[in-house]
Structures are given as C-alpha cells and as structure tokens.
Image (cartoon, rainbow, N blue to C red):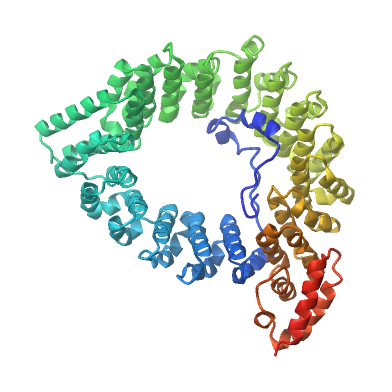
C-alpha cells in the first residue's frame, strides 16, 4: 500500500527468506505474488480532501499531495493537476505535476496534449519531463511532430529522451529517421548516441546511406555506443537488403567489419552485443545462422547469450530445436541454463515435446539451471503429465536444493493438472521436512496454491504455526493470507493466529499482524484492542505492522486514534507512512480529531508536510474540516484569505471547539487563540 510512497517492509529476515523462494515469471504465471500487498485504494472523500491540499500555501505539502494522487493513479483529477504545469508554479510542484501524468501510464494518453504545451519551456528539466510523460503514456506515435524539434535541443538529456520517444514511435517516426541520422553526425555525447542508435533500429527502414553514418560508430570509444551501433548496423543491413537497396559487395564488406569488431571485443561486450541484437525480432530472425555459429563455436558466455537470443526468434528458430536440446546437456551449467531458457522463450511448441529435458533440469545440480527449468515449466501445460519420474520417488533422496525446486514446481504442476496424489504427498513431506528452509519454502508455495488448490494441505500448514522455528511460524502465518476467502474462514484464521500476537519472536509477531490486515479485524472489537496494544511493542517494525493493521479495521479502530497520531513521531528516523494510511482509512475525522491530528508537527517540525497532507485527506474535503486545516497546523495562510465574513461565526465556533481537542500541544493551543483573534478581525 502507498500513502504516498511504496511501503517498505522493515523486518528483513523473514521476508528475505520468503522472497528467496520466488522464481520470477514461473510462479507469477501460476498465481499473483502472495507477499505483494493489495494496492491502497483511497476513498472518494480522502481523494477530495487531498485535492483540497493542492491549494495549501506550502510547496512541500502541495508536492506531496500531487505525488499521493499520482501513486493512487487518480486520473479523474488530471484537470486540477494540469493547472500546476504552468510556469508560475513553484519548480518542485511543477515537476511533480509532470510526474503525475507519467505515473498514469497509458491511461494518461488523453492528457498528453495538455503536457506538450510545455515542450518548448525554457527549463530543460521541464522539457525532459514532458518527454517522459510522452514515453510513459506510450503516446510517441501520435506525437512525433511535437517530439522531432527536441532532437536539436541544447541539452543532451532532452535530445536523448526525444530519441527514446521516436524509437517508441517505431514506423510512425519514419519521416524523421534522417533527422536522427543527421543528429548522430553532430553529437559527441554517449547519452544521445546510444538511444539514437537504438531508436533507428526500432524505426527501421534504414538505407545504405544510413549505414555509412552508423557503421563507423561500432568503433566508438564508449562500449555502450559500440554495442548499440553494432546492433543498429546489423538491423540496417537487414532493412537495406530487404529493400534491394544494398549491393552484395557492400553487404559483405560491412558484415566483415562487424565480425572483425565483434571478435576484437571483450567477452562481456560480445555477449552484450548479442543481447542487444535480441531486442529486434526481425534482426534476430535474420541472424539465426550467425547465432547458430556462435552456439557451436563461441565461448561459454557467448554460447549462453546466443542461445537466449535464439529463443526470441519465434517460429523461425524451431528448426534449431535439436541444437538447443543438445546444448541442454552441455557440461557447463551456464550453457545448460541458457538452452532451457531458449526452450521456454520459444513457448509450448518447443517445451511440450521436450518435457523430459525440462523435468530433468529441475533435478540439475545447478540452481541456475533449475530456476530456468521452473521458468519454462508453465509452457508445458497438459504435457506435464509426461514427466519421466514421479517427484515423490526422487524427492526423499534429493539434495536440499533439488527438493526446494521440486516444491517450487508444485504451483505450476497443480495449476495445469490439479492436486493429484503425487503433489499432495510431496507437499505434506515438505511441510514436515527436517530442513527449516524447505518448510519455509513449502509455506511460500502454499500461499501460491491458495484456497483454490491448497485446501487439502491447509491442516498441515496450520500445524506449522506451532513449529519450533520462528521463521517457519512466520512463513506459515504469511501464507495463510491466501486462504482468507470468506468470512467463516477468516474467522477461523483469526482464532488460529491470535495467540501468536504474544510470540516471543518479533518476526512472527510482525508476520501475524501483516496477515491480520487481510482478515477483517474490525469484526472483533476486542481483537482491535489487542492489535492496538502492539503499538507499544519493543520492536519498531512490529509497531509499524500494528498501526497498518489498525487501518484495515477502519472506523472500528477510531477509539485508538490518539495512539495512531502519536505513532507519527514513534521513530523520527522512519517516515510515518503507515500512520498516514491508517488515518486515511479511519476518516473522515471531525474538527476536534483533526486538531489532534496536527499535534505531531509541533513535536517534529519536519513532519509538517506529511501531517498537513494527512489532515487534508482525513477531512474528507468537508467545509468544517478544511477550515480547521487551513487555519491551523502552522498554516502560512492569512485568516482573511481563508475565512470570509459569512464564515466568521462558523470559524469562531470551530476554533473554540478545537480548544477541547483530546490531544492539544501548548503551541497549538496558542495558535488557536491567535487565530481566533485574527478571525474576529476579518472584515
């Protein structure tokens, strides 16, 4: 959840262990990441209050409000944010406003026209920010005419961004290919040359004349430029040859120069060149013969890179399956891993007939090979029935690493074939394994299986809540989040987890609280009180988890509002994002509660932007709440700019009532008194 930044977990041990079992791609295909929090979705009233913060006199408050709205992807307020793009807006706020549109991503494409009005702004940071919006919203193809002039910008970073945008536009930028080529002849900057070369390869349609400009850059002093130039030159040869615009003699001469330069490069640069070529599918398809040669004759590193790129050639590479499968038996694990990766990239047509190779990869002594086999496994589908062994037969005698891999494969196999006896036996064995790491790994896998596929193993997972090892108890607690599918199950899980609030290990207490966030704690007021008690835990990460879980209880946690407010200054070194989010989930607050919420900024002055933004959001945008926030909390606004003559009586009553706030700092009390005097003087 984010308010207004990404929340970072603070207890490293358990999370590090759990995340170490994740295999990017393979497990995510089976089910979404179980450790990934659901994104925070603010209520309409919180958004309304946060929009009101855009008029705060403090630049820092406004900038923070814009960032929060961007994090929440609030496209509906784009018109309000667009007003902040103007030149008279303070620079920090203005840049945040541009970032807002970039953060919207493709859904923000309809707002690009408003952003492009500032493409000629005197500030190069603004010009770069404008192009970043075009790039992030994927709006380059529709706006090539507006992008093109920025290729001649005085600032390198702006020219580089313009090149990136034209590259994203692809064929739509064909009319400006020559401008890019011409710019290469005048720019001596790495920051421009590399993106310009990549853009040319993306745009395509390169000619023999373009090759004359691009090819010499394969000998540039900077390796990144040489890499990009090599790939762009090869792409140009393919384009020019296809258009019958290249003589055989020139094609031969340039290819020889490419080969000579390739052989002259360090191994890591040669590998990078091959990988760069892999970014252009047409070039990869045209380079299959060269890739095959490198696979047959290259060094280990080159073979591996060539295999991975060959996997990007699609159907054109399927006739090379015998070569790829041969490399899967290579003595070097790097090559074996790359061969299996190539099979996975080529998809079901390559994986299904080679399930034995993928399956044996799961048993490989190399973790790298095993991980690539896991990545490729989902493409097997129903063909996973053709495993050359039963996992339960090889599991007992396998190494800890292989046992772990077989456990990681469970969600993939179960997703394709269901939870059969073999998978159930393997799962139970893993949950009772003598290895702590494997019990933790299986807990992670249980979170992947979830209620849909793992219910038969749920009793075994619940047993781990009493495991002697803290990391296992914590892992089991986190995994149970995936089984919280209905009210009755959530209630049973609350009952099972509740005793662990008093666990002797802080990581376990943290894990339990983190899981309770998904278990509707508001259903049991006594439970909310127990959670609030952990705001006084000796470990700061546990206290963070407790305050965040109170937020999940929403209005039911209101009796503990003052403790949440105090949490704003719990640890001055840790920004109180969890407390901000929790207050938002308790909102809207009444004027007295809002007055109390302002208390922390009188303890730590640096909290002013976050506290004031929280108060705006918690006001729900209601007139009384906004009056309090705009008048108090070290606001820089004059009373006459906040209160009209018609509002005087109401503002006076609110301020008098604010003096009764349950949490009232002496300086805040003095400020209220001073504001009362100012309000009475409003004409």
Query: Quick one: quadrant of the C terminus?
Result: bottom right
Pinpoint residue 187: horizontal percent, then vertical percent. Answer: 26, 48
Pinpoint residue 578: horizontal percent, then vertical percent. Answer: 71, 51
Q: Residue furthest bottom?
A: 683
Pinpoint residue 55: horizontal percent, then vertical percent. Answer: 60, 72
Q: Quadrant of residue 417?
A: top right
Pinpoint residue 437: horizontal percent, then vertical percent. Answer: 69, 22
Instruction: Please name the residue shown 90% across and 49% down the image.
Output: 526
Answer above or below: position of 10 versus 170: above
Q: Quadrant of residue 600?
A: bottom right
For this view, does 651 lie left or right of residue 380? right
Q: Quadrant of residue 217?
A: top left
Q: Residue furthest right?
A: 526
Answer above or below: position of 487 versus 677: above
Which residue is more in the foreground, 542 or 342?
A: 542
Answer above or below: position of 202 versus 384: below
Instruction: Please name the residue shown 66% across and 22% down the image.
Output: 423
Instruction: Please name the residue shown 67% across and 63% down the image.
Output: 613
For this view, does 613 lie left or right of residue 135? right
Answer above or below: position of 558 versus 286: below
Which residue is more in the foreground, 390 or 482?
A: 482
């Amino acid at each position: 959840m984010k308010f207004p930044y990404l929340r970072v977990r603070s207890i490293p041990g358990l999370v590090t262990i759990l995340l170490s079992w994740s295999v990017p791609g393979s497990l995510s295909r089976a089910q979404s990441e179980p450790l990934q929090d659901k994104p925070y979705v603010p209520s309409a009233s919180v958004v309304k209050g946060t929009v009101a913060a855009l008029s705060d006199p403090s630049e820092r408050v406004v900038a923070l409000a814009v960032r929060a709205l961007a994090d929440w992807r609030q496209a509906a307020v784009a018109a309000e944010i667009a007003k902040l793009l103007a030149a008279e807006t303070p620079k920090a706020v203005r840049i945040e406003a541009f970032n807002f549109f970039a953060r919207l991503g493709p859904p923000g494409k309809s707002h690009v026209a408003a952003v492009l009005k500032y493409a000629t702004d005197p500030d190069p940071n603004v010009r770069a920010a404008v192009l970043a919006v075009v790039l992030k919203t994927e709006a380059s193809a529709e706006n090539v005419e507006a992008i093109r002039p920025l290729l001649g910008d005085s600032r390198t970073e702006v020219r580089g961004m313009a090149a990136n945008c034209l590259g994203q536009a692809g064929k739509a930028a064909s009319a400006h290919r020559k401008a890019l080529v011409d710019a290469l002849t005048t720019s001596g900057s790495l920051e421009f040359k590399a993106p310009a070369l990549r853009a040319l390869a993306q745009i395509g349609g390169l000619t023999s004349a373009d090759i004359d400009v691009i090819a010499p850059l394969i000998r540039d002093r900077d390796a990144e430029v040489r890499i990009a130039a090599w790939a762009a030159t090869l792409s140009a040869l393919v384009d020019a040859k296809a258009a019958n615009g290249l003589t055989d003699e020139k094609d031969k001469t340039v290819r020889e120069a490419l080969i000579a330069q390739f052989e002259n490069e360090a191994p890591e640069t040669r590998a990078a060149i091959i990988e760069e070529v892999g970014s252009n599918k047409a070039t990869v398809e045209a380079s299959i013969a060269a890739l095959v040669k490198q696979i047959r004759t290259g060094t280990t590193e080159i073979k591996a890179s060539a295999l991975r790129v060959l996997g990007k050639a699609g159907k054109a590479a399927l006739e090379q399956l015998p070569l790829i499968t041969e490399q899967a038996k290579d003595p070097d694990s790097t090559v074996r891993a790359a061969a299996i990766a190539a099979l996975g990239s080529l998809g079901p047509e390559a994986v299904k007939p080679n399930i034995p190779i993928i399956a044996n990869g799961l048993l490989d002594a190399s973790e790298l090979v095993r991980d690539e086999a896991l990545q490729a496994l989902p493409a097997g589908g129903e063909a996973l029935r053709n495993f050359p062994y039963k996992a339960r037969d090889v599991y007992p005698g396998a190494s800890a690493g292989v046992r772990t891999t077989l456990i990681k494969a469970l969600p993939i196999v179960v997703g394709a074939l269901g939870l059969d006896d073999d998978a159930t036996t393997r799962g139970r064995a893993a949950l009772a394994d003598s290895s702590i790491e494997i019990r933790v790994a299986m807990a992670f896998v249980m979170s992947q299986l979830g209620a849909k596929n793992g219910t038969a193993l749920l009793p075994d997972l619940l047993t781990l809540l009493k495991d002697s090892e803290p990391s296992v108890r914590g892992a089991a607690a986190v995994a149970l989040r995936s089984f919280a599918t209905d009210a009755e199950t959530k209630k049973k899980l609350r009952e099972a987890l509740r005793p662990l609030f008093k666990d002797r290990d802080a990581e376990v207490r943290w894990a339990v609280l983190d899981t309770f966030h998904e278990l509707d704690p508001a259903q049991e007021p006594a439970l909310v009180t127990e959670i609030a008690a952990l705001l006084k835990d000796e470990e700061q990460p546990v206290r963070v988890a407790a305050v965040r879980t109170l937020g999940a209880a929403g209005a039911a946690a209101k009796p503990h509002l003052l403790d949440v407010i105090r949490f704003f200054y719990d640890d001055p070194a840790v920004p109180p994002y969890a407390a901000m989010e929790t207050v938002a989930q308790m909102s809207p607050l009444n004027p007295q509660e809002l007055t109390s919420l302002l208390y922390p900024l009188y303890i730590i002055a640096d909290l002013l932007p976050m506290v004031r933004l929280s108060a705006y959001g918690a006001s729900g945008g209601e007139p009384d709440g906004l009056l309090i926030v705009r008048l108090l909390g070290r606001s820089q606004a004059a009373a006459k700019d906040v209160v009209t003559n018609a509002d005087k009586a109401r503002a006076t009553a609110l301020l008098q009532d604010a003096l009764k706030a349950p949490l009232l700092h002496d300086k805040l009390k003095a400020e209220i008194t001073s504001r009362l005097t100012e309000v009475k003087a409003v004409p």
